[in-house]
Each structure stands twice: as structure tokens, then as C-alpha cells.
Image (cartoon, rainbow, N blue to C red):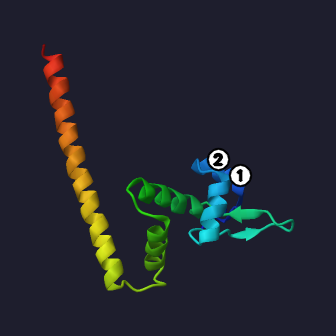
Amino acid sequence: MSAQDKKLFFIGQIAKLSGISITTIRYYEDLGLIKASGRTDSGFRQFSLKVLSYLEFIKQCQSFGLSLQEIKELFRIYDQQSTLTDETKRRLEDKILMLDNQIEALISLQAELKKLLSERINQ
């Protein structure tokens, strides 16, 4: 583990690095989505750089329509703190299907835009 991996950052620094507000980071911590690595003697939260990957994952999941509760469940499954119930499996399969549909729609839109661009360039 490098010294950079061990270094702890204040919440404001993490907010700047992640592009996520301090208030939102605190909210995610309150929900149990992320954890501070510790606190200073004066009570300031400190985070490792690892929290940035969690924050990025949260943003990505939200952009595809997953709720914070669903994201929390994904983290539990990922951390093997929770088994994959039939209900969770069904919800994940539904999300995968939704993502597949979005990908298909984006590919279709991309093809149309390429066609339009090609037609305009060739005029």
C-alpha cells in the first residue's frame, strides 16, 4: 500500500476531488453508503482516497436510475454482508434489462446521428 493510499483527506477535499457537495457526502455517510476512515481530535471527518471510487459508483448508478437504497443493497452484496435474495436478484435483473434497453436506444440514436452527419457532409 502506497503512502498516498494511507493518506486521509478532509471532507472538503473529497468534495472537490469528487465534484459532490459536502452536504451530499455527509448524507451518503448517514445512509451508510460510505464511511469516514476516522475523525481528527477536533471531530473533522477524514476519508481515504478509496471513497472516491464509491462516490463515482454512486453517481454512475444514479445516472442510470438506481435509487440510493438499491445502491446500498449493491454495496452490501458486494461486501458479502448480504446474500442475494430472490427479490434482489429480480430487481437486479430488471435493472440490467433497463440498461440493455437504454444501450439499444443509444446505439440507435448514434446510428441516426451518424447518418444525418454523413448526409450533411456529402451534400
Whether residue 24 appears in this view of the structure is yes
Q: In the depicted view, which residue is nearer to us: 70 or 48?
A: 70
Vertical placement of residue 41 versus 61, above or below: below
Vertical placement of residue 22 versus 54, above or below: above
As helix, strand or loop, the secondary structure at mark 1 comes to helix
Image label count: 2
Residue 57 spot, x, y in % from top left: 47, 60
Name the residue beneath numbered marker 1: 12
Residue at 56%, 69% (x, y): give it.
33
Residue at 44%, 57% (x, y): give it.
62
Q: Given the current orientation, which residue lies at the most extreme right position?
A: 42
Residue 97 spot, x, y in % from top left: 24, 64
Mark number displayed over residue 76:
none
As helix, strand or loop, the secondary structure at mark 2 comes to helix
Vertical placement of residue 98 versus 113, above or below: below
Name the residue beneath numbered marker 2: 16
Three-letter code, disc 2: Lys
Question: In the rendered image, which quarter is residue 82 located in?
Answer: bottom left
Q: In the depicted view, which residue is nearer to us: 82 or 98?
A: 98
